[in-house]
Amino acid sequence: MFKQQISFVGDPGLARQAIVAKIENRELGKMRQNLHNNLAKLDKAKRIGRRNIVPILKNIITTVKRFRELNVPLPNNLQRQCSQLIIS
């Protein structure tokens, strides 16, 4: 893995903020991907007729809770899928 050098002239606090923002963005990306994968697993389990979907639902609920705790809106496509999940 390569290291990206971030340099700001003058204020080292800005460089630190940029690094923290980059790490937070990466974590949010992982959470989005996790939610997307779990929704796909749930869809597949429903199509196959698998009965034990509770662990998948728990994962989806905890991920959505983490998004809400961080006050970050869900992406539109995931918001739509979660809304359809609640309806069905």
Image: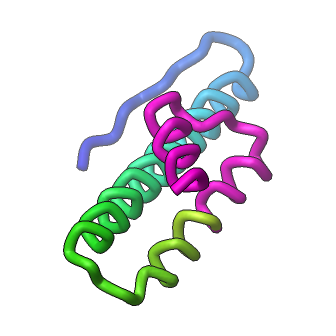
Q: Which residue is situated farthest in the front direction here?
A: 88
> Secondary structure of the magenta portion, mostly?
helix
Report the coloring of the rendering: rainbow
Position of 49 relative to 4 (above/below): below
Q: Which residue is situated farthest in the bottom direction here?
A: 52
Q: Nearer the viewer, residue 31 or 60?
A: 60
Res 63 quadrant in image = bottom right
Determine whether, in the image, residue 59 is placed left or right of residue 40: right
Position of 69 relative to 13 (above/below): below
Q: Is residue 32 visible?
A: yes
Residue 48 percent across, percent down from the top left: 20, 75
Q: Which residue is situated farthest in the left direction here?
A: 48
| Residue in the picture at 40% in, 88% down | 52
Determine whether, in the image, residue 2 is placed left or right of residue 26: left
Position of 19 relative to 85 (above/below): above
Q: Nearer the viewer, residue 46 or 17?
A: 46
Residue 39 percent across, percent down from the top left: 40, 58
Q: Is residue 26 visible?
A: no
Position of 46 relative to 77 (above/below): below
Res 66 quadrant in image = bottom right
- Assess whether residue 5 is covered by the magenta stretch: no
| Residue in the picture at 31% in, 58% down | 40
| Residue in the picture at 45% in, 75% down | 56
- Assess whether residue 64 is covered by the magenta stretch: yes
The number of numbered discs placed on residues in the rendered structure image is 0
Residue 4 percent across, percent down from the top left: 37, 33
Magenta residues?
A: 62-88
